[in-house]
């Protein structure tokens, strides 16, 4: 899901979302932003938009396959028209994964992951740059992953795309600072979403995830939304080029000694 926003952010209550994409949209919109969002199917977008508007949130949406150049151009045209040629915030939250051993990836699988997870974000930045410049207080937010920071056996190509996204974040933060545009990324660990629940349904796997997380739990979608809204707000006006892990301490969790003291070493 990609989101374009025209508005400043003000504080208001958040609504518990279903997944990370909805969390970010709802966090921005509930803070007073006008949001245009997209997803792959029109039915999905229309259902979400109807629910948001019933809650009084100023959200519009459209179907868009961000891996398609023509579809990206259509999204850009819609946003430009809707927000009268100026966008304050661009959120690129698109991504999918294929998990398998490195030697088993086909060229087609590699290309699909690169196209959706990385090239789409790069191309959207190119398209939306003129609209962000006109804001004079623009912000880009990417959805990366802790898989870009540490090895977690998530699939090598997915990890590569997210690591490249981190470098894109840092590079654009420096290049576009002169244009008044900040660029940051969030890097979540396991978040309590329908997709994650499918993986965490395995008790042994879920225990391993929790044991590796100092916070002792998985994250909630609204926690991703809240951090995303902060990074897109004026409260974060001096924050740029950062990749912020939302992971309960997972990415900084090193080796822990056993609770029982090891035998004393002999010289």
Image (spheres, grey):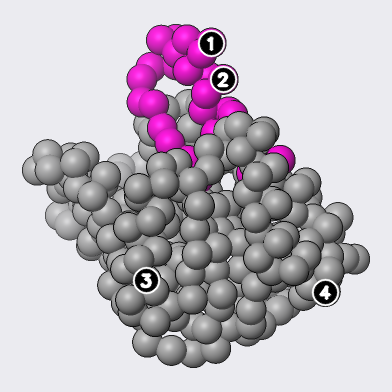
Q: Is residue 10 magenta?
A: no
Write down the residue under mark 4: 136
Percent coordinates x, y for residue 33 in the rendering: 56, 78
Write down the residue under mark 3: 52
Query: Which structural element holds mark 1?
Result: helix
Q: Work out whether mark 4 precedes mark 1 in sequence or the reverse, and give the earlier one.
A: 1
Task: Give, as a single range, the part of the protein colored magenta.
Answer: 94-123
Task: Judge from the rendering whether residue 257 lies leftward or rightward of residue 5; answer left or right.
Answer: left
Query: Which structural element holds mark 4?
Result: loop
Task: Judge from the rendering whether residue 172 lies leftward or rightward of residue 66; answer left or right.
Answer: right
Q: Which mark is residue 111?
A: 2
In the image, residue 111 sits, relative to residue 141, either above or below, namely above
Depth order, front residue of 100/6: 6
Query: For the point 38% across and 17% down, which residue is it?
Result: 101
**Residue neighbourhood size for the residue with mark 3, other residues' Cα within 10 Å, grouped as few (<14), some (14–19), many (≥20):** some
Q: Which mark is residue 62?
A: none
Pair 3/2: label in front? 3
Depth order, front residue of 100/74: 74
Question: Distance of mark 3 from mark 2, alpha carbons?
Answer: 35 Å
The quadrant the C terminus occupies is top left
Query: For the point 23% across and 62% down, which residue is it?
Result: 216
Write down the residue under mark 1: 107
In this view, the residue farthest toward the left is 203
């Amino acid at each position: 899901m990609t989101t374009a926003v025209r508005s400043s952010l003000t504080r208001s209550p958040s609504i518990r979302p279903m997944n990370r994409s909805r969390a970010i949209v709802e966090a921005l919109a509930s803070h007073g932003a006008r949001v245009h969002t997209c997803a792959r199917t029109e039915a999905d977008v229309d259902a979400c938009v109807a629910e948001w508007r019933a809650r009084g949130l100023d959200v519009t949406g459209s179907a868009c396959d961000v891996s398609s150049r023509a579809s990206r151009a259509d999204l850009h045209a819609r946003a430009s028209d809707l927000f009268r040629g100026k966008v304050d915030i661009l959120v690129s939250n698109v991504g999918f994964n294929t998990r398998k051993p490195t030697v088993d990836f086909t060229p087609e699988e590699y290309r699909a992951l690169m196209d959706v997870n990385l090239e789409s974000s790069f191309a959207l930045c190119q398209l939306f740059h003129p609209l962000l410049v006109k804001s004079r207080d623009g912000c880009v937010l990417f959805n990366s992953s802790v898989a870009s920071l540490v090895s977690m056996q998530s699939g090598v190509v997915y990890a590569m795309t997210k690591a490249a996204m981190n470098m894109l974040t840092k590079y654009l933060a420096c290049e576009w600072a002169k244009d008044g545009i900040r660029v940051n990324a969030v890097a979540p660990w396991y978040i309590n979403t329908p997709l994650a629940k499918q993986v965490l349904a395995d008790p042994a796997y879920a225990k391993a995830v929790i044991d590796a997380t100092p916070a002792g739990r998985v994250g909630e979608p609204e926690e991703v939304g809240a951090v995303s809204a902060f990074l897109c707000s004026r409260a974060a006006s001096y924050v740029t080029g950062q990749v912020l892990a939302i992971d309960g301490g997972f990415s900084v969790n090193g080796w822990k000694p056993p609770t029982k003291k090891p035998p004393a070493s002999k010289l």
